[in-house]
Image (cartoon, grey):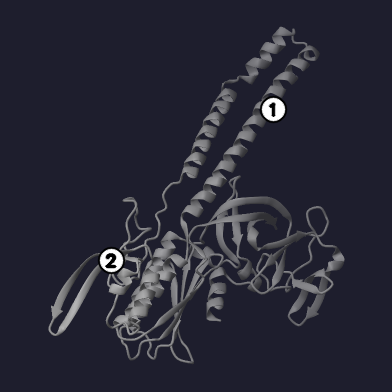
Amino acid sequence: MFELIGSGTVEAITNVTVFDGDNTIFDFLIASEQDEVAMVAAFAQLDPSGKKLALLQHLRPEHSSAEDDTSAAAGEDGSSEVIPSAEMSSEMLEQLGEVAAGQAMLQNMLGDLCEADLSETMDTILRQNGHDLRATRQALREVAGQLSDQLREISQLGTQIMGHLSELQHLTAALRTRPADTILRPLSALVATQSRKNGFEALLSTTGGDEALDVRMLNTLRSLPSQFLKVRLSQPTKAPRRLHLAIRKLEDQVSTILQDDGSTMPEDNQITAMEEELATHGGALRVIKRPEGGIRLHIFLPINLVVLDGMVVGAEGTRYVLPVNAIRSILQPDPSALIHVSDPAGQQIWLRLGSDELIPICDISGHKPGQGIRRKRGVDGKERIHVVLNLPNSCIAVPVDELLGQQLVLSRPLRGVMTGLNSISGVALLSRGDVAMVLSPGALYGGTTGDEYFRSQVTH
């Protein structure tokens, strides 16, 4: 320890010597610019057994007293890391100022229109021209032209305000997201510290550290595994030596998979406590015993509010939103590109994209890929527009009647009886006040609900 202090990477603040029978215990309070993971690694080099040197508590300076549930004080076992608070940035304040100024201008322009009495104006023009319609025609055209100019200015101002609101929405979403590595690194340190404290060596590997998640979601995902890992590592002879934690963000869910090579199954009361905690957040837990030994926990949590960059389309009189990042291309195919195939399950229609590429056509109503699809014409009598969507291992084409444009929408989760809607992950309110259904491309491919699609993914 004194060698580490003398290396210059650690500064000793104070130390206390405690005599416990024949044992002499040195308690050091040190400061370092290195993070917790680096310190645990340095201690492991000094004491590979983990019996003589241990990190008992890790403290981080708090830079703001306004941090709430989005941040937490560091735990005494290295399981916690302060998640930065989501405070309002200068860019957000600037956008709010632009919106407020634009709204004030819009209100003044609308007030001028409301104060203008068109009937009185027309009567005045008629009186001035002796009620001669031909003579008053030019004057009326000038008045109509002025009104058109005012309405055009109001429309342009409204468009600018919508742009500022969209930018504000982007900034708000970015402000509340952090990489999953914010919690994965401390959990790796927790496993290393707890195992050495109990007299053995365990390693936690992680994937998905680049996934951007909301700070509330991160806090939930941090507390659940940490408590489970503490109990799991408390029995040295039966505890796992190799663990892996993977986080993956799906369209409307966050999948977390924790697996290990331990020799025992977790206690029922521990699983029940985790299920009850997840239920409060609308999530669920699945426990699987691995054939090669150990367990696998599948944890999923719904993303309650999703700011989605979507393409709004119309199909069969309904508005839908498709994620822009899932769109590969948009085309209006030639009739010869639609390949009809018949089998016992019914007629199938596939779309030929090239000389060596065929993809299934999946109807928005949730039919199986290429099955039960009736060939329809678009509103202009031509072939319908087909939106080609990228999936993890394939592509599908979705026929729509019209494209209504790209916009940023806030997707809200389905509630009540609507949770059983095929291929729908949420609902969104569009800029013109219409309600649109948010499609889940992965669930659309299988004709299942978003929840069923997620469960099939974590099961396999």
Closer to the camera in the image, 62 or 294 = 62
Q: In the displayed structure, does residue 116 sit left or right of residue 129? A: left
Residue at the spot x=37%, y=90% of the render? 264
Closer to the camera in the image, 194 or 169 = 194
Q: Secondary structure at mark 2?
A: strand
Q: Secondary structure at mark 1?
A: helix
Task: Look at the image and tell me in which quarter the N terminus lies.
Answer: bottom left
First along the sequence among labels 1 and 2: 2
Pointer 2 residue: 30
421 up-or-down from 205: above or below: above
Amino acid type at mark 1: Ser
> Residue 410 location, x and y as percent?
54, 53
> Residue 205 location, x and y as percent?
46, 78
State the image quarter where residue 372 is shown.
bottom right
Q: In the displayed structure, does residue 433 sit left or right of residue 337? A: left
**Can residue 345 be seen in this snapshot?**
yes
> Residue 273 location, x and y as percent?
34, 75
Query: Which callout, 1 or 2, points to the residue nearer the camera?
Result: 2
Pointer 1 residue: 148
Determine crowd level at label 1: few under 14, some 14-19, many 20+ residues with C-alpha closer than 10 A: few
Count of picture labels: 2
As measured in the structure, the alpha-carbon distance from the residue carrying label 1 to the one carrying label 2 is: 72 Å
Q: In the displayed structure, does residue 353 sit left or right of residue 265? A: right
State the image quarter where residue 149 is shown.
top right
306 up-or-down from 278: above or below: above
Residue placed farthest to the right in the image? 336
Closer to the camera in the image, 362 or 55 = 55
